[in-house]
Image (spheres, helix red, strand yellow):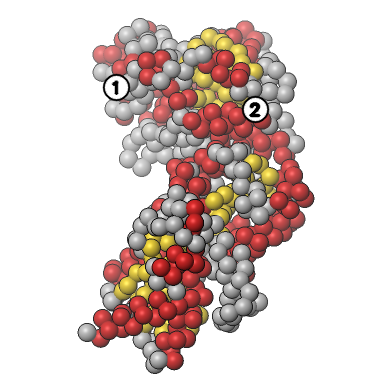
Amino acid sequence: MIPVPGDVLAVGRIDRRLPFEERVRLLAQAARAVRRRDLQMVHAAGLGHIGGDFSSADIVAVLMLAVLDVDPLQPQMPDRDRFVMSKGHSSGVLYATLAVAGFFDPALLDEYMAPLSTLSGHPDARKVPGVEASTGPLGHGLPIAVGMAIGAVLEGSARRTFCLVGDGELQEGTNWEALAAGAHRHLERLTVVVDRNGLQQGAATEETSRLEPLADKARAFGWAVEEVGGHDHAALLKLFESLPIRPGQPSFIIAHTHKGYPVSFMKDRVEWHHKIPTTREIRAALEELG
Amino acid sequence: MTSTVEAATLFDCRDAFASTVEELAEQDERVVVVCSDSVGSSKLVAFKNRYPDKVVNVGIAEQTMVGVAAGLANSGRRPIVSAASSFVTARALEQIKVDLAYTNAKVVICGMSPGVAYGELGPTHHSVEDIAWLRVIDNLAVIVPADPRETRLAIRAAFEHEGPVFVRVSRMGVPNIYGEDYRFRLGMANRLRAGTDLTVITNGTLLSHALAAADTLRARGTSCRVVSVPTVKPLDVEEIISAAQETGAILTVEEHCAHGGLGSAVAEVVVSSHPVPMRIMGFPGFLPTGSALWLLEHFGLTADGISVAAAELMTRKHS
């Protein structure tokens, strides 16, 4: 097993009273730790989706560690913010981030996809603290998130719901049903983040079934749209803290990312959707991550 | 247990469904009905007028309807999904599997107008496969009530159950079968007629036909037990094994395909515990167009058809 110092995971959730720059510095540190740990997990399991993990890593870290109102010690706190990882195949990065946040012992990450492990290849909401929805089949998360957001409205709660979807995933029609339903109900505390890395399992989204003009489509469905660099912690944090983009509308954030980011030999390479790095590649990737 | 077949008034179980949902909403402010443009076809117009905020109509989008229900359950609400059985069960099957059953979401799914209720509309609208594809999903209870009272009690039991439940709500007219003393328990079968020569196992709209057939058979000297199995899952295994052991022949009758439904569930128990001659009565597959009653008649799913099948089964038993 490739050694990764345990202490790099001891970041915890980031106190929002800290100065903005300090929070951004801690986020960079946490995201690096998450990626390092994820590499180790995928290597040990011999399975995983490292490319999509790395394109989502910064979005998940910013949301989970610095934005969501959640309590890792009370994962079922009723009025917590909700986060749905609709691209459930990026479970590696979700688990590592939940461990960093303190939802469970980071040692559990060693069991990723092992027989009888609670950390399955796709997240199980019944087994993993901090996982709100069991996802895996694509196009399930956004309808669930719409239901969560409607539930908050019915309860008169100001809690927020976030849903991270893959870009290829948007080819599933349920997303567009849910976009229509979310806009119809003016769910301004619902935010969708698209991990727009441009690549799906086998090819570019635009070569498979074109998504563009994605922003125009989302606007036409009645959502307020912003685009952001999906690896820019400061920009992501600033945007998430300024939501909703427009009052009375749900928010649709297109986060421009790179599959495999920032590892030079993985970045924007479609084969890294679920290729398993060799020991040599792991060492090279760890070297690059620093 | 009281049970009488009156050739009198027939009832649409959707009325019992709608009034039960209204009672539940009176008692629990977390109740929310989730529909896919199915408010009218679920007979929920009065409910919507009374509780406009408690109806989430996502439009014609069954998959999103079930996903939204899962999200509402996560968000502390108590969702009751209601839509045509053929569409919610087939179109949203993966959402039922993953978002509800695998996640153990406390959601009640009510499949309206199931079986051949939409007879004339053709096989696209028939729902004669729903029990087959739902009963294999782990952690999902499946109930097929037979009359308005059982529908009411089943929905209440489903609402209290610690996990997702599917309730098949008939539109085809059925008589009142159960009296006020009836106690529904999820997972429990009801022995409605004692008998020693064979057992008819049934549920839903065909229970009244099975009871009438048993009375005819008795008059002809055949002692026919009738067991109603409203809960197809979890199945009352003990009652089925008793039927096999004590009567030695089992005839199942359902408003569903003859494969994959109640008959198959019973057969799975019988072959692995106490094999006896069996016959499974149901539909063969895609059906022709025709009214619900015409279809039942055409495929022999009537009191007469059940009597004839029972007599044939008795011959097999004794050969």
Q: Is residue B84 above or below residue B214?
A: above
Residue A183 is marked as 2
The residue where tag 1 is placed is: A276
Contact (CB < 8 A) between labels 1 and 2?
no
Give the image location of residue B202, x and y in percent: 45, 71
Which image quadrant for residue A210? top left
Q: Quadrant of the C terminus of chain B?
A: bottom left
Q: Is residue B172 above or below residue B107?
A: below
Q: Residues within 10 Å of mark 2 (few under 14, many from 20)?
A: many
Do the residues at pointers 1 and 2 share their chain? Answer: yes
Task: Name the residue at 29% across, 22% down.
Answer: A276
Task: Name the residue at 57% across, 70% down.
Answer: B174
Give the structural element (helix, strand or loop) at label 1: loop
Q: Nearer the viewer, residue B30 or A74?
A: B30
Q: Quadrant of the N terminus of chain B?
A: bottom right
Task: Name the residue at 41% across, 15% down.
Answer: A206
Residue B100 is marked as none
* Chain letter for the residue marked with disc 1 in the picture: A
Q: Nearer the viewer, residue A119 or B210?
A: B210
Report the amino acid beneath label 1. Answer: Ile
Report the amino acid beneath label 2. Answer: Ala
Q: Residues within 10 Å of mark 1 (few under 14, many from 20)?
A: many
Give the image location of residue B297, x and y in percent: 44, 70
Which image quadrant for residue B9? bottom right
Give the structural element (helix, strand or loop) at label 2: helix
Instruction: Return the disc, 1 or 2, that comes first in the chain's sequence.
Output: 2
Give the image location of residue B253, x and y in percent: 41, 70
Left or right side of A3 for B41: right
- Going by the picture, which residue comes out furthest to the right? B50
Task: Name the residue at 44% across, 42% down.
Answer: B94
